[in-house]
């Protein structure tokens, strides 16, 4: 990796934004797991709840305080549940808090590992955990997410809506470099870049150029390319060919929901939003699933596995492995929620993982 993770030894200060809907329920389980880890490994984790959410916005009129991002920078890491609420139809608070954190903290690496934990969770016929084990690196600070554009004559039949895509050499270079460095550090031999350079002949030509200029610096790694539409097809037909995928912001968003489906659904998928060496943010891939909220049905594994990614990034690798081990055991024993074939509620599924940590 380009620089060491924020090494904090046996302590860490973590900001927790549980957010909205099922975000609150799954985050509560992730915090229980972190407290169990703290006990078992003798760590000292300071978990500081921040109230930023749709409720907070509707009550105060502000999405986050003016010094909010400076506050986040004082923590070693940030853990988020999910943001999104039908009472805020323009999604303003989610944009400010979630996308704001990615942009303001310059978290340019969206790290989304795709791991099938048990064959029975995969919707594809005959696929095993060996076939679904790869990592997507999604560019996280530019692309179509930069909110440059606008609407002219909005609401009329003459409306013109412009939403610009930004690709910079610096932005493309640093995410592709991260993907190659990750592959090298883990002894992997394949990096696949996906773009749409056959249609987006300006912006994605830059991805082509950077990828092909960088690949020779990694002679042990096969650098391959698919157009994003073909990538989506191969993720379904032959996911076993992938080790590392690198792509832009929007394409990465889309294919990581597809990746989540290969793992057993959105409830299983974890992510990190990283700027190596700086305060990073961790969150499940799923959203606030408003229709599931408050029903004790959401799968907490995506949030719990995100907490494990956080500990791994903070250098607490044995602790992260203990969480992953307890999650795997709970899945194998079917001590899980209904979305992946169990009978438990969110809290009970979280408790099963906590027991796996405490009684290991
Ligand atoms: P969603 O991920 O919230 O839910 C889509 C579907 O996935 C659900 O109906 C459910 O079937 C399944 N699902 C998701 N999480 C699950 C879990 N933990 N356990 C079991 N099943 C689960 O996506 P959506 O419905 O498109 O969006 C709802 C809201 O969340 C929107 O406001 C959206 O903008 C927001 N959102 C936020 C984030 C985030 O905070 N990172 C991510 C995605 C969507
Ligand atoms: C994700 C989400 C967000 C994104 C939304 C909520 C803006 O879908 O983290 O995958 O598109 O990045
Ligand atoms: Mn998404």
Image (cartoon, helix red, strand yellow):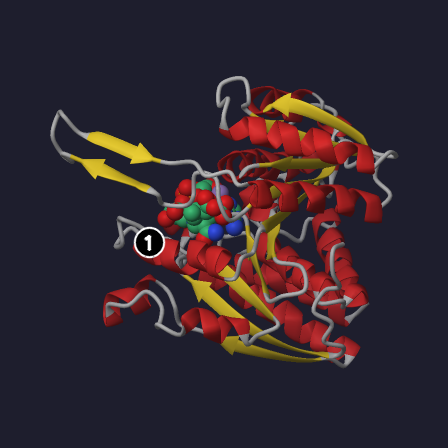
Name the residue beneath numbered marker 1: 85
Please state the horizontal and vertical placement of residue 257, each as a whole percent of the image. 54, 38
> For disc 1, does the CB lie below 8 Å from ligand 1?
yes
Vertical relation: 312 (above or below) 226: below
Q: Quadrant of residue 45?
A: bottom right
Please state the horizontal and vertical placement of residue 13, each as a whole percent of the image. 61, 77
Residue 47 falls left or right of residue 53: right
Q: Quadrant of residue 230?
A: top right
What quarter of the picture does the N terminus occupy? bottom right
Q: Which of 213 and 304 is in front in this view?
A: 213
> Does the rendering let one see residue 358?
yes
Q: Nearer the viewer, residue 232 or 344?
A: 232
> Does the rendering let one see residue 123?
no
Residue 98 falls left or right of residue 307: left
For image coordinates 56% across by 56% down, the residue present is: 107
What quarter of the picture does the C terminus occupy? bottom right
Which residue occupies the extreme left position in the image?
156
Vertical relation: 168 (above or below) 73: above
Residue 299 falls left or right of residue 330: left
Q: In which quarter of the image is residue 169?
A: top right
Provide the secondary structure element on which disc 1 rests.
Answer: loop
Please state the horizontal and vertical placement of residue 264, each as a whole percent of the image. 62, 39
For image coordinates 32% across by 51% down, the residue present is: 91
Please state the horizontal and vertical placement of residue 330, each as a whole percent of the image. 71, 54
Q: Nearer the viewer, residue 27 or 214?
A: 214
Vertical relation: 305 (above or below) 74: above
For image coordinates 76% across by 81% down, the residue present is: 42
């Amino acid at each position: 990796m380009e620089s060491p993770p924020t090494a904090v030894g046996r302590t860490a200060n973590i900001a927790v934004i549980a957010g909205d809907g099922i975000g609150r329920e799954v985050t509560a389980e992730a915090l229980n797991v972190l407290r169990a880890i703290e006990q078992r490994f003798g760590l000292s984790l300071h978990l500081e709840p921040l109230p930023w959410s749709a409720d907070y916005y509707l009550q105060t009129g502000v999405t986050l305080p003016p010094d909010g991002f400076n506050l986040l920078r004082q923590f070693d890491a940030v853990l988020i549940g999910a943001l999104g609420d039908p009472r805020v139809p323009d999604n303003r608070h989610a944009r400010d808090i979630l996308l704001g954190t990615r942009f303001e903290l310059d978290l340019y690496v969206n790290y989304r590992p795709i791991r099938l934990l048990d064959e029975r969770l995969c919707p594809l016929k005959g696929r095993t955990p060996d076939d679904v084990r790869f990592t997507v690196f999604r560019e996280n600070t530019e692309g179509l997410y930069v909110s440059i554009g606008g609407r002219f004559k909005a609401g009329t039949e003459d409306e013109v809506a412009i939403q610009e895509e930004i690709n910079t050499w610096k932005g493309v270079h640093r995410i592709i470099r991260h993907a190659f460095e990750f592959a090298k550090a883990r002894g992997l031999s394949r990096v696949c870049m996906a773009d749409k350079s056959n249609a987006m002949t300006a912006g994605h030509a830059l991805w082509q150029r950077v990828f092909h200029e960088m690949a020779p610096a990694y002679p042990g790694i096969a650098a391959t390319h698919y157009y994003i539409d073909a990538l989506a097809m191969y993720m379904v037909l032959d996911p076993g060919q992938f080790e590392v995928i690198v792509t832009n912001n929007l394409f990465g968003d889309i294919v990581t929901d597809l990746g989540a489906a290969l793992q057993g659904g959105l409830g299983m998928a974890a992510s990190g939003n990283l700027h190596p060496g700086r305060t990073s943010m961790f969150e499940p891939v799923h959203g606030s699933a408003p229709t599931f909220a408050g029903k004790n049905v959401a799968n907490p594994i995506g949030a719990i596995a995100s907490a494990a990614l956080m500990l791994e990034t903070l250098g607490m690798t044995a602790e992260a492995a203990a969480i992953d081990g307890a999650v795997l055991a709970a899945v194998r024993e079917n001590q899980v929620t209904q979305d992946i074939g169990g009978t438990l509620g969110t809290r009970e599924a979280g408790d099963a993982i906590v027991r796996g940590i405490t009684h290991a």
